[in-house]
Amino acid sequence: MAATAIPSYNPSPRVEPLVQYRPLHPTFGAEATADFATITPDLVDEIKRGLAKYGVLVFRKTGLDDARHVEMSHLFGDLDDVAPFVSGLGQKNRLSSDYLFDVGNVNPDGSVMQPGTMRDLLLKCNYHFHADSAFNPRRAGISLLLAHELPPAHLGGETEFADTRSAYEDLSPDRKEEIKDWVVLNSQLQCRRNANTDKDGILDPLLDTDEFDPMKHRFGKHRLIQLHDPSGRTNLYIAAHAHHVEGMPIEEGQRKLKELLDHAGQPQYTFKVQWKDPGDLVVWDNTCVLHRSVPGGYAGKYKRDLRRTTVHDMGPQAWGLNGVGATWRSGLD
Ligand SMILES: [Fe+2]
């Protein structure tokens, strides 16, 4: 009887995962590694899968520049842009693309933003936990923030994140029942005013005008409790932009919203990202985490040049209760 030939053994080539993850916190966030030399839809899909689980991904020394930052961002979905502000408000964009949001402290003329200037007052809102564009009719989904120039590490300027899926899960059953159908009216002006109100409740006179009065402008209406589709978990969509709750006396709603924002910002739900090198990229999903910029001694002295692309929420709740296709923007309404 002829011997049966032993099948030759052809091991499949070992395939490295496109992204590798190292958790940064017990419930969310990961430091991730990937090769950004070749940006492909497969890489972007894997980053999205990572975001569904971790909410925040930190990539070090990516080597990305403005052009490739924007090019990669397009693969994530529809991008928000600053063009309406450049044309509508006569602002100058010092950056190479209107898809780049200039969220650091560098003035259009290249100088370091000085404390007390109007731009400084407006950007103080970013020191409070928020979700990008909660105040617009179509909210932000994924944000991609790339470092270009950084202050010395010991002078602050970290970005802190908060896990709003875990914060929701930890609410009592009674609280979940109370808030389950709330609709929140969000305003960028609310955040800017709160950020410039002192401990005695006195608003900086520069913002005590109709131009900065939330009640004289439109609100971005979104449900407070939402299914986070990519993970199947429930999210608490609260932000420093939250102004009041639909159908509730304004002051009562503001008090209850502040309680929820304070709850989500507790230490057990948060961690800080220390920016280390130009090329560091932090990517997050605004529909399941909050973020804020941490103030520090670098202000007025050193550049903190961070540039953000913003992917519109591509999910079914992107437009909230603002009407699908609404084109107005906060600050231009
Ligand atoms: Fe932001």
Image (cartoon, grey):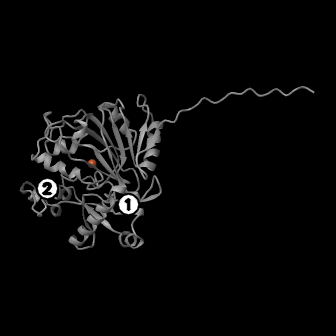
Q: Secondary structure at mark 2?
A: loop
Q: Residues within 10 Å of mark 1 (few under 14, many from 20)?
A: many
- Residue placed at 56% from the left, 32% from the top? 15
Q: Residue furthest right?
A: 1
Query: Does residue 205 show up?
Result: yes
Q: Which mark is residue 63?
A: none
**Where residue 139 appears, x then y in whole percent?**
32, 53
Location of the N terminus (image quadrant):
top right
Quadrant assignment, res 58: top left
Up-down relation of residue 4 to residue 78 (above or below): above
Q: Dot 1: what SS?
A: helix
What is the x, y in percent for residue 270? 34, 53
Q: Which residue is mark 2?
A: 196
The residue nearer to you, when weighing 274 against 283, is: 274
Residue 191: image quadrant is bottom left
Q: Nearer the viewer, residue 185 or 21?
A: 21
Which amino acid does the dot numbered 1 rest on?
Ala
Amino acid type at circle 2 is Asn
- Residue 232 locus on image (x, y percent): 47, 57
How crowded is the residue under tag 2: few (<14 C-alpha within 10 Å), some, or many (20+)?
A: many
Residue 278 image point, x, y percent: 29, 32
Q: Residue at x 24, y 43 (%)?
A: 157
Q: Residue at x 18, y 37 (%)?
A: 93
From the image, tell me which residue sits under label 1: 167
